[in-house]
Amino acid sequence: MEDTIAAISTPPGTGGIGIIRISGEKSFKIASRIFKGAVEFENIKTHTINYGKIIDPSSHETLDEVLVSKMKRPASFTKEDVVEINCHGGIIVLRKILGLIVKEGARIAEPGEFTKRAFLNGRIDLSQAEAVIDLINSKTDAGSKAALNQLEGKLSKKLKEVREKLIELIAHIEVTVDYPEHDIEEITGDMVYESLKPIKSLIYNISETFENGRMIREGLNVVIVGRPNVGKSSLLNELSGKNKAIVTDIPGTTRDIIEEYINIKGIPIKLIDTAGIRETEDVVERIGVERAKKAVNESDLTIMMIDGEAGIISEDIEIFNEVRNKRNIVILNKIDISSNDKIKEIENYFKDYNLIKISIKTGSGIEKIEEELTGLFNKGSLRLNDEILLTNIRHKNMIDKCMVSIDNALSAYDGGMPLDMITIDIKDAAYYLGQITGESVNEQVLNEIFKRFCIGK
């Protein structure tokens, strides 16, 4: 924390603008040595942007024309003195300026170290820090909104309110047990029990938002399965609007998993094209088939495709038996070249299931697939505008442990345990909530969280 750190904060590669961030005690001293503008750096007002040049003080070489932002602590992202240098976005220019900054006394920042300092300096709590990486990685407007709500502290505020209630309850119990002579209202087991029930209800309601949060953050896992050459890759290309998958008339063209994120009416979907499932002697294709079966097991929804021209055969039935117990849509493709008899045969077999008839070649019926995908997950169950939405698996684990501890406390009361024994479980519940916001987190957890960040954030 005493070091001054620096890193390139823009993605690698060529761009119009590149940004280098410096944070720490020596930030202003380093900037004053390498930045030359119309106003000396020491005299620049905080939170202003100034034009000038970056010059190596030892060789007097000009490295680039830049815009420099000066942010005096504590009014900065890290609550430390921060300098941001906006230069041209060539990787050579960025590396030369960063190398000069390091030569002048900074060190290269570790992944996520700027955000980690913001947390350690009290600017944000741990759940807000984790929301930063979620916001960077968000793939849809819904995912971005969920991350932004968490970054603004909406989840933290609710959890801290619950944690404070637990701590107040612990304090009241301990005073009653340890200092019975004090003139305060004595708390009873009945009072503790009645206080814990609404707290458990609040925690449960937050926990219940996780499945929706996961779907918004990661996208719904929708796997397309079927025999070779029924149109799976063509469907992926059609829904994504891209030629992501190779399409040929040769069965077995797709041999690996192909993923594409799409957004249908605000619903983020991870669409997965798989190898055609069939018995094969080809080693590579057989591996693809095994991966396809694994993807089905991990999916939220399967799209089972039938070739309307060929009609339903034993391989189709075997594949459907694999996905029968999953949430699924059955798609009858190639209706433009299918006979009425074959269409009726397929309709009769799948009469108890959700069957959509399409032709990828003509575009007929594609909109019905999109309607079905959004309808399955948006019938009052996927609330994209919720302010409190649990999206992080670590948070979900801590919430679940908190609920277990509260249940243990309630069971201890039912078993006639004394108040001081019940307090142990209530303390555990408060500890697990503190693990989410960072009030009771250890260094190992912090390191695990921040190593997922990119360098420069």
Image (cartoon, rainbow, N blue to C red):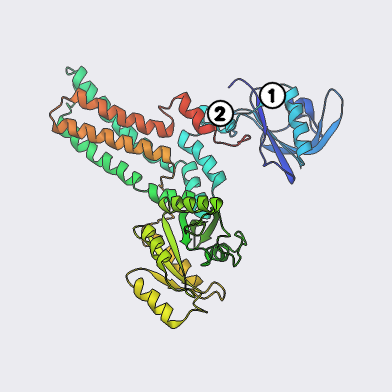
**Image coordinates for residue 135, horizontal then vertical, percent:** 54, 45
Q: From mark 1 to mark 2, how far is it between C-alphas?
A: 15 Å
Q: Residue furthest front?
A: 281
**Mark 2 Cα shell of 10 Å, populated few (<14), some (14-19), many (≥20):** many
**Which numbered disc covers residue 117?**
2
**Image coordinates for residue 229, horizontal then vertical, percent:** 53, 66
In the image, residue 343 above or below residue 156: below
> Which structural element holds mark 2?
helix
Image-quadrant location for residue 115 = top right
Residue topped by disc 1: 106
**Image coordinates for residue 304, horizontal then vertical, percent:** 44, 64
Is 456 positioned to the left or the right of 161 in the image? right
Amino acid type at mark 1:
Ala
| Numbered disc total | 2
Q: Quadrant of the C terminus?
A: top right
In the image, residue 111 above or below residue 287: above
> Which structural element holds mark 1?
loop
Name the foreground residue: 351 vs 78. Answer: 351
Is 351 positioned to the left or the right of 10 in the image? left
Q: Quadrant of the N terminus?
A: top right
